[in-house]
Image: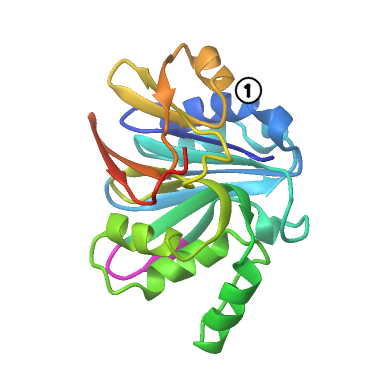
Amino acid sequence: MCGIFGIANHPEASHLAYLGLYALQHRGQESTGIATSDNEQVHLHKSMGHVADVYDEDVLNKLKGSNAIGHTRYSTAGDSSENNAQPLMVTMRPFGSVALCHNGNLINAVGLRYDLEEQGALFQSTSDSEVILHLMARSQETDVVEALKEAVRHVQGAFSILLVTKDALIGARDGNGFRPLCLGKLNGSYVLASESCAFDLIEAKYEREVEPGEIVIIRGENLKSVQALPSTK
């Protein structure tokens, strides 16, 4: 299943991500990770184990920034190892560092990976999620959202995705809406999660489901929505 959680524009982003992941622990118990951004760079910590065991106050304080995404993993593609723990982070021009976490299965990931490796791509994991990052890196688009739109149009299967860049939180859902992704609000902060139980723990208000095929882009207090894929619902 895997659990994903994201929050934007909050001074305690890493701590709230921890709480959100704690509430989603039932969705995956193999590994966990949190990536944060502070308008300059992306910070990452991930490890095998349960949420309560992986993070302490020192770790959370080092994850600086007002945007955060987090992941609890239940492996469906790729072996159970720290290399496959998410979020996955890469640096790509012209976007800088981008971290991604993913819930779902990409049924054409093996073929896409083979094609990308033939073109010289070097993979750091055996997870199908990494294919999306490589597709973004190969894009000629100069806007990160446009690169993501291009990437998700190449993949087939079920997915809900969260990305954090140096200044934004981005969420996306496949056109069939097979995997859940909820949108909530906590004062001036937007929150995204696999299940609304993650909102309850941090006292965020449920707003709506992210629509099938929708991408939401959150920068500060502003949310923008684009339809990246045709919805089948």
In this orientation, does residue 37 appear? Answer: no
Tally the marks: 1
Place residue 20 in its image quadrant.
top right
In the depicted view, which residue is nearer to us: 84 or 138? 138
Q: Is residue 105 visible?
A: yes
Residue name at image x 34 percent, y 53 percent = 41
Q: Is residue 9 magenta?
A: no
Task: Looking at the picture, tell me which residue is in the foreground, 99 or 158.
Answer: 158
Residue denoted by label 1:
23
Is 139 located above or below residue 185 in the figure? below
- Quadrant for the N terminus, please: top right
- The colouring scheme, among rainbow, by chain, secondary structure or one colour, is rainbow
- State the extent of the magenta-drawn residues as a range: 90-95
Name the element at disc 1: helix
Q: Is residue 75 above or below residue 11?
A: below
Q: Residue at x 61, y 32 (%)?
A: 56
What x and y, as percent, mark residue 2? 66, 40
Q: Residue furthest front?
A: 232
Which residue does the image show at 73% across and 61% down from the upper left? Answer: 78
x and y, in percent, of residue 103 in the image: 60, 45
Q: Nearer the viewer, residue 106 or 101?
A: 106
Residue shown at 42% from the left, 63% from the top = 151
* Residue 208 rendering spot, x and y as whole percentages: 41, 22
Against 130, residue 33 (above or below) is above
User: Does residue 102 appear left or right of residue 187 in this picture?
Assistant: right
The crowding category of the residue bearing disc 1, from other C-alpha atoms within 10 Å (few below 14, some 14 to 19, many at least 20), is many
Choose top left, top right, bottom left or bottom right for residue 123.
bottom right
From the viewer's side, name the closer residue of 77 and 98. Answer: 77
**Percent position (x, y) of residue 181?**
50, 33
| Residue type for callout 1 | Ala
